[in-house]
Image (cartoon, helix red, strand yellow):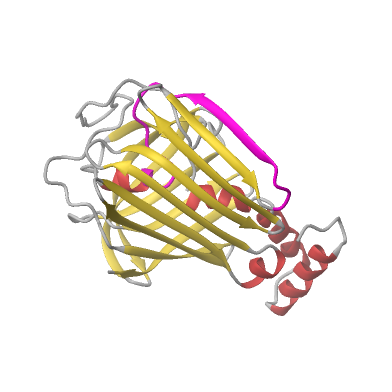
Amino acid sequence: MRGRAGGPDREAAVVICREVSLHTRTAERVLTFVRYCRMVTALLIAAMLSAQQAPPTATTTIGPAPVQITPPRRNYRFPDGRTYVYSVEWHLITAGTAVLKMEAAGSERKVTASAESSGAVNVIFPVHDRFESRFDPRTFCSLSIFKHSEEGSHKRETSIHFDYARKKSTLDEKNLKTGETKHVENDLAGCATDVITGFYYLQSLPLQPGASYEFPISDGKTTIVRASVDKREQIKVPVGTFPAVLVTAEATSGPLRSKGKVWVWYSEDASHTPVQMRAKLGWGTLLFRLQRIEK
């Protein structure tokens, strides 16, 4: 649903906001929000892209760290079969639901994610997105990404493959409404994670307060992400109350530099469950709160 100023989208937003006792100005903010649903999905489901870097080595430090992907420690237990279900809130409005899951897929690991709009946002601008990533569990290097996006009247499918031998990432995209296709190749100097697996990558690290990590994330383009473990906090979410460590992640180079920030609260136990996430962009802040864990 795309409406011109004063058109059906704005009228629907005004009606919805009146029903929930919100000022008409909030309707305009809702419209601003839905126009950025693609960025919301990336942030969720988070907020960072890729970068060129040297081949990975197993190094973790307190303080500044090398720009690289650190392979999982020996005998690391991946959260296979666990499904994390989050509510998504924007200015106290429930905007939708996000779901993350990892499972074994032969010699690889598969991460799936979905984003579903709800409430006022779903009426104005419905979003139904699916994401699948495969990575090498020995190195945490992403191997492929598949995205199916339904956002308003836009419907697209995107496939990205990482060819580390050729040092290239290949993106193929199809507009399911018009049939238009796109093929793009980008340089890829070494191991990189992706926009969804990156949350699991951080989950695998020691996450001691004072530690910092820099690593590349790829979604067909290039960004270096810096993550710092800031402090310990007690976090209450619908699924329970957790002692947690706060990790702040921010792009330091590439297309998302200085355009946003992500905070993730990981439980301070062996599982490092991401119990809460917050994403801040120029137009507002999104809050993801863990509703339940399904096994």
In the picture, the quarter occupied by the N terminus is: bottom right
In-front residue for pair 122/137:
137
Which span of residues is magenta-colored?
177-198
Where, quadrant-wise, is the C terminus in this rendering?
A: bottom left
Residue at image coords 45%, 25% = 168
Asked if residue 280 lies in the magenta stretch, the reply is: no
Q: Nearer the viewer, residue 223 or 64?
A: 223
- Regarding residue 148, the answer to whether it shows in the image is yes
Residue at horizontal 43 percent and vertical 51 percent from the top: 132
Count the labels in the image: 0
126 left or right of 86 in image? right
**Image location (x, y in percent) of residue 34:** 67, 57
Q: Residue at x 45, y 32 (%)?
A: 50
Q: Quadrant of residue 61?
A: top left
Residue at the far left: name it. Answer: 75
| x and y percentages locating residue 27 in the rendered image | 74, 64
Query: Would residue 100 appear left or right of 232 to someone viewing this image?
Result: right
Q: Is residue 170 above or below residue 97?
A: above
**Residue 186, image x, y percentages:** 51, 25
Inspect this view and state whether residue 230 appears.
Answer: no
- Above/below status of 219 relative to 127: above
Which percent across, then down, holds residue 6? 88, 61
Q: Picture quarter containing residue 288? A: bottom left
Residue furthest to the bottom? 19
Residue for point 59% across, 33% down: 183
